[in-house]
Image (tube, helix red, strand yellow):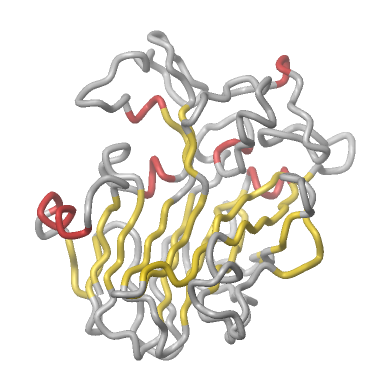
Amino acid sequence: MTTLSKNGLLSAALLFLVLGCSVQMSSSTSACSAFGVCASSSSSGAGSSTGGTGGTTSTSSTSPFSIAVTTYWESDGVKAHASEWPLKKFASGSDTELTDVSCDISSTVTAGSSGAINQICGVKIPETQLFHSNLELTVKAPANHSCNVFYFSPYYYLASTSATFTSTWATTETDCATLTNGLRNAACFSGPATELVTGFPRFRGFVTSVADTTVALAQKFTASSAHSKQRGDNRWTTYQPSVAAHAGTPGLVVGATQNWSFECVKSGSGLQYSYELRILADHDSSPFSDRYYGWIDDSGVDWDPTLIFQ
């Protein structure tokens, strides 16, 4: 197995040429990039991860392609008090209201069908807990799966297009109006993709080629907490609403976001399974509510501009 940084415009083959030999062998027969984690070839499918060991996932083992979302407090390096957040479907016509219906892809669904691809799923995490917790995303496929290629795109957004941008997480001014080789400075963006993907924004995700699909696939990615990254709120990880639905949201730059996405592709057959994950910051009870909000409140209303931090 080989994992490479992903650019939406470049093929995996070209990426290999760009990155050269930035791969390392794991203890199994697979290989992956130095950044991210290797997928295990064992039946447990547990890859290595940052931030200690421990914690479990509750995603159904019967799903042909599943995502598990776990948080653990910054001080909980061994994940003794990790919290799991099951994927839920959104209510019809809402980007903030979750139902009680599981969003896991069922083993009875036909690969490549409407019930297997483009699944938009959400999790709600209390705002203070999310702000002070590391975020762990685990992708799994059982033995004899159909994922010859796995794509993972971490979340990011463009924070500014100003020529004099000074963010809350930096001490120097950045020119975000000027493009260099067609790209803005990495400091103009925010979100876990900026720390997970080496070479961001030229590369914006990961491509994993799987040679042996008879063994279980598992990959684990860990994003640092918003607090540790010196952000002022939960925009670091949370879903950014569409421009059409929330045009008045301060700091919303048109067409400049990438939601969490996971894709399983079978050679010769195309896309088999895919998820778009939307993380929402749930309100804490007063007087702690709205300290660490995301882009929108629980009712889908844009935040008061006077409260917004970048």
Quadrant in which the C terminus is drawn: top right
Residue 103, compared with residue 4, is above or below; it is: below
Quadrant in which the N terminus is drawn: bottom left
What percent of the width, then of the height, locates residue 255? 48, 31
Residue 63, compared with residue 14, is above or below; it is: below
Question: Is 301 left, or right, of 78 in this rendering?
Answer: right
Question: Is 247 left, or right, of 196 in this rendering?
Answer: right
What percent of the width, then of the height, locates residue 202? 27, 39
How many numbered callouts? 0
Q: Residue 276: which quarter of the image?
A: bottom right
What percent of the width, then of the height, locates residue 194? 39, 40
Question: Is 101 left, or right, of 230 in this rendering?
Answer: right
The answer to which of 95 and 68 lies nearer the viewer is 95
What percent of the width, then of the height, locates residue 28? 26, 84
Q: Residue 217: which quarter of the image?
A: bottom left
Query: Which residue appears at 68% of the width and 28% of the height?
Result: 246
